[in-house]
Amino acid sequence: MLIEVHSCPWVLSAALGVICFFMIYKIEGVIQSLGGQFKDVVRTRVYIRDLKDREDVARVHGERFPKILPANTLIQASLVGGKHLVEMEAEAIVMKAGDGSD
């Protein structure tokens, strides 16, 4: 599941930690809208423009995924859009009722 957070001026002007919290809450909301739970996340990928931001991103990721511990990859990348500091992807496995996931 790829979750895209569109750039909003107030988000882009916020601290990177705030942006990451916002993105993860959006990911959680989409998973729930599909019938899943936040614990269904199995992998995340985070793309950052500047490696100096890695500790802020890792801190927020750790705070939001303290017990789930999905596989995580952090990548430095030239992001499209001059103001974009971070992009995040998440994969979740959402089981349907009655498929043995209980």
Image (cartoon, grey):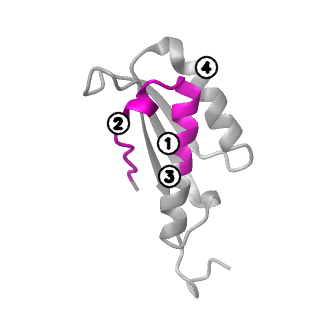
Q: Distance between the residues labelled 1 and 2?
A: 11 Å
**Which sits in the foreground, 71 or 12?**
12
Q: How far apart are marks 3 and 1 (CA)?
A: 6 Å
> Residues at badges 3 and 1 in contact (C-beta under 8 Å)?
yes
Q: Earlier in the sequence, mark 4 or mark 1?
A: 1
Mark 4 packing: few (<14 Cα in 10 Å), some, or many (20+)?
few
Determine the secondary structure under disc 1: helix
Q: Earlier in the sequence, mark 2 or mark 3?
A: 2
Q: Which of marks 1 and 2 is in front?
A: 2
Determine the secondary structure under disc 3: helix
Reading the image, the residue beneath label 1 is 23
Left or right: residue 61 versus residue 89 is right
Q: Nearer the viewer, mark 2 or mark 4?
A: 2
Residue segment shown in magenta: 2-25
Q: What residue type is labelled 4?
A: Glu
Q: Residue at x 54, y 38 (%)?
A: 72
The quadrant the C terminus occupies is: bottom right
Q: Indicate the position of residue 84 as horizontal and vertical percent values.
A: 35, 26
Reading the image, the residue beneath label 4 is 55
Mark 1 packing: few (<14 Cα in 10 Å), some, or many (20+)?
many
Q: Which amino acid does label 3 sit on?
A: Ile
